[in-house]
Amino acid sequence: MSLYGIGASKGLAVGPAVVIRELPPIERRSLSPDELPAEKARLHRALARAGGELAELQSRLSPELQGIIRAQLLFIQDPELLEAIEAGMEAGKNAEWAVAEATNEFVAAISMLASDYLKERAQDVKDFARRLQAALLNVPAPAIDLKQPSILIAKDLTPSDTAALDVSMVLGFATETGGPTSHSVIIARSAGFPAIVGIRGLLDAVEAGDTVVLDAFSGELIVNPPEPVRVSYAAQMEEQRKQLLAAKNNKHLPSITMDGREVELAANIGSPQDAVSALEWGAAGVGLFRTEFLYMHKNSFPSEETQYAAYKEAVERMAPHPVIFRTLDIGGDKALPYLEMAAEENPFLGYRALRLCLDRPELFRTQLRAILRAGEHGSIRMMFPMVATLDELRRTKQMLREAAFELGIARLPEIGIMVEIPSAAVLARMFAEEVDFFSIGSNDLIQYTMAADRGNKSVSYLYQHLEPAVLHLIAGVIEAAHSAGKWAGMCGEMAGDPQAIPILLGLGLDEFSMNAPSLPVARELVRSLSYAECRELAERALKCRTVEEVSSLTYR
């Protein structure tokens, strides 16, 4: 039996299924007025127990994962949520019933928002409610205890489930719900194991102990495959394992083609701790440091000192390799609980990233100062997301110059823009006169060029790395950079796509930045290629009219 979803973290896995079920249905019981005080006391004991469990779990996690649990600890102190629960109890409902009703209403309200990011944060509420219900029942909170390497099957993996996972025992996971920005997917990509999300009917089709094949390249999950199919996938995985091991052992080798064209292979990271993994996988630098991770799961904006300490740590860990800091890309689809913003019809086209930062200069100036100060400890570059116009870039550069003057810093780092809006690609020659480099954000560039949400299965056929229109935009951006004596990189998923790398190399891309586990394969691929032949391949690709035509092209 085959089921299909969205491959959110690419890869293959074959193994036994561990099915994660929900708690049993809660008891709904009417309370008499005399029972209310004791029931409220039971609720507060459960809150204390849930808080203790979360605090203990948080203490065992790495700093970048502690924020996931911190978000749930805030619910224990949330007066509005507590008032809603107690109001339900005063209306004659037992604690379990009142908790379910209040949290369900909270989740429903969040799910009505346009922001995909906030919709997925509703999972934090569900996770908290599940833990609180377990505490009320005086049973252990559901936990994932893996005895052998397994493939996780679930309706969705909760944030605390994901944070506490022993990733060495996880072959991959598949869920009925979830999206590309969920905690579980972010961790899967970082750890390098495959994941498929959005599989309808998953829990009805898979039983614990079933053998499953997880093909996150195609989004296919095969349940109890015939022996020949299982053997075929196992052979593919073994071959990939050998190739990856050999490639990882060669991480010290330069990323240079057979005819002498050298490119930079860098890593995308979201915290200083990720820098360690980046170096282990052979990164020659950081092509994208997602600074917004410092802002999430907190009560307020991080101070200049907090940001400076994190940025400095990343720079020192990567030295002498460069770190490219992307300034805050928040708002719209990635809102902050402490940042008041008006609801938007289409947050992907709204008030976010550089638009928000320019509108809130004190917030932006704090970050610019922190990054500039960190640059005193190593090699840094800085780039700005969602740049649509030259005026936005010029205003940003002026703010950067002012911040540097305040700090007594005479020499600015290299600065660039993320080319992810078609207007920036169309005006690339003009932008190239005012920046030191371009970094192509392929994820958003494809999405905006094709008017296709990459998380929407109904239009996923339009979201393709090798779409001719996208390739022509990329070619124009690279040519514009080189004509001005500047360099061009890419930090979207396309940069780590083995099918796209030869074409991108042929188009002249100078830097490829990707999730760290993808680096060894990319390095081996680059070293096996001829730049001259890649240029011929790219020329043929630019003459194609459909994705199918481009996909049918073969190197050599």
Image (cartoon, rainbow, N blue to C red):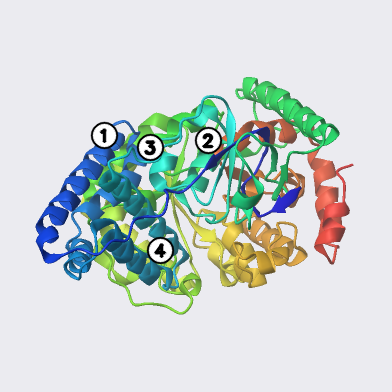
Q: CA distance from mark 1 to mark 4?
A: 26 Å
According to the picture, the residue beneath numbered tag 3 turns out to be 272
Secondary structure of the residue carrying numbered label 3: loop
Residue located at (48% from left, 41% from top): 187
Q: Looking at the picture, does residue 531 appear above or below residue 294?
A: above
Residue located at (66% from left, 55% from top): 5
Circle 3 or circle 4, nearest the eye: 4
Secondary structure of the residue carrying numbered label 2: helix
Residue 329, given in percent of the width and then of the height, sits at 42, 59
Instruction: Say if residue 369 shows up in the picture.
Output: yes
Q: Which mark is residue 56?
A: 1
According to the picture, the residue beneath numbered tag 2 turns out to be 191
Q: Which mark is residue 118?
A: 4
Front residue of this view, candidates 288 and 379: 288
Three-letter amino acid code of the residue under disc 4: Leu
Circle 2 or circle 1, nearest the eye: 1
Front residue of this view, candidates 522 and 533: 522
Quarter of the image containing the C terminus?
A: top right
Q: Which tag, 3 or 4, sits closer to the chain's start? A: 4
Q: Which tag, 2 or 3, sits closer to the chain's start? A: 2
State if disc 4 and disc 2 touch (CB < 8 Å). Answer: no
